[in-house]
Image (cartoon, helix red, strand yellow):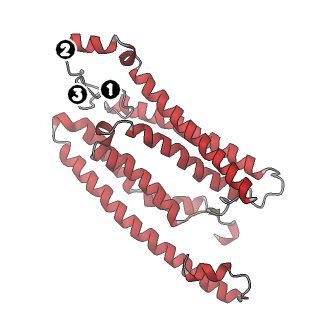
């Protein structure tokens, strides 16, 4: 906590409106500088990953993976534009800590997962990300919902309201993400759903091409329960893990608020009033 924040919390010291505005402006400038530095660092990382994907796209055996690296790195590189749109049109003010959390998740999913191939080299890395996303998205939506109903007198049970919105939104996003992965795989022959076995049959992730291995090896794999349920277990496992972690966050939020005897999340993400836009 910096000196300005300590001064704001010291209720025993009276401050004029002008002094409070100076302190608030100082904090805003500090947050702006942190956001700017983070945007530059992460954008450079994503653009570097994008460049790597473009170079590897000329390798015919790597084209499917290269396409995923390119598309994910590109969308991650324009995350700062998303912040701008969210703040301008939805009037949401995201603290630097929230932005850093979003960037870390994007970094893990794109650069670490695809570029460094953790999806293929680290067991259950994909499952970890789906669990992390369920927890983190539930947290973000809860903060927004809690801040929205903070001053709403017609919403009697604000914690229940925020919890319900958080749970439904996070589960809906988890479901729609799987639909998105399926659409990309169908259109571009990628393996976003990770439904192709990453063993001796793996062909680099190109779902437009036949699997590696002989007909006997392919038949042997898919004749077993692990084989013929491989794709279904992956997709449903992702949704289930995201839902479980969403539930864990909401239970934690209810417990923490009950212990604190207030909603500790209702000021983490603020919605600006229209007259202040």
- Residue drawn where x is 72% and y is 59% of the image: 260
Q: Is 175 positioned to the left or the right of 53 in the image?
A: right
Most distant residue in the front direction = 259
In the rendered image of this protein, does residue 79 appear above or below residue 4? Answer: above
Circles 1, 3 touching at the beta carbon (< 8 Å): yes
- The mark total stands at 3
Image location of residue 128, percent across then percent down: 44, 41
- Residue drawn where x is 65% and y is 88% of the image: 19
Q: Residues within 10 Å of mark 1 (few under 14, many from 20)?
A: many
Mark 2 or mark 1, which is nearer the start of the sequence? 1
The quarter of the displayed image where residue 206 is located? top left
The quarter of the displayed image where residue 233 is located? top left
- Residue drawn where x is 55% and y is 78% of the image: 27
Quadrant location, the N terminus? bottom right
Residue 217 at least partly seen: yes
> Disc 1 marks which residue?
196
> Disc 3 marks which residue?
203
Quadrant location, the C terminus? bottom right
Q: CA distance from mark 1 to mark 2?
A: 16 Å
In the rendered image of this protein, does residue 208 appear above or below residue 180? Answer: above
Image location of residue 136, percent across then percent down: 53, 49
Q: Which circle marks residue 214 in the picture?
A: 2
Q: Which circle marks residue 10 in the picture?
A: none
Q: Is 107 positioned to the left or the right of 135 in the image?
A: left
Q: Residues within 10 Å of mark 2 (few under 14, many from 20)?
A: few
């Amino acid at each position: 906590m910096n000196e300005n924040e300590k001064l704001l919390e010291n209720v025993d010291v009276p401050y004029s409106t002008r002094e409070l505005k100076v302190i608030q402006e100082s904090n805003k400038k500090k947050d702006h500088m942190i956001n700017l530095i983070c945007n530059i660092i992460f954008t450079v990382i994503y653009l570097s990953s994008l460049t790597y994907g473009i170079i590897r796209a000329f390798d015919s055996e790597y084209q499917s993976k290269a396409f995923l690296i390119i598309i994910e790195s590109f969308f991650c590189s324009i995350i700062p534009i998303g912040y701008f749109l969210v703040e301008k049109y939805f009037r949401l003010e995201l603290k630097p800590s929230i932005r850093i959390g979003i960037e870390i998740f994007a970094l893990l999913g794109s650069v670490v997962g695809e570029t460094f191939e953790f999806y293929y080299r680290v067991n259950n890395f994909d499952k970890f990300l789906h669990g992390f996303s369920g927890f983190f998205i539930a947290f973000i939506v809860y903060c927004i919902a809690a801040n929205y109903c903070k001053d709403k007198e017609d919403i009697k049970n604000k914690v229940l309201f925020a919890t319900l919105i958080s749970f439904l939104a996070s589960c809906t996003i988890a479901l729609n993400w799987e639909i998105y992965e399926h659409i990309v795989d169908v259109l571009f022959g990628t393996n976003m759903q990770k439904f192709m076995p990453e063993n001796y049959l793996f062909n680099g992730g190109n779902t437009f091409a036949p699997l590696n291995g002989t007909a006997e090896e392919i038949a042997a794999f898919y004749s077993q329960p692990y084989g013929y349920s491989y794709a279904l277990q992956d997709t449903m496992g992702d949704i289930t893990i995201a839902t479980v972690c969403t539930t864990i966050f909401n239970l934690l939020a209810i417990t923490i608020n009950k212990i604190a005897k207030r909603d500790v999340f209702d000021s983490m993400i603020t919605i600006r009033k229209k007259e202040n836009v």
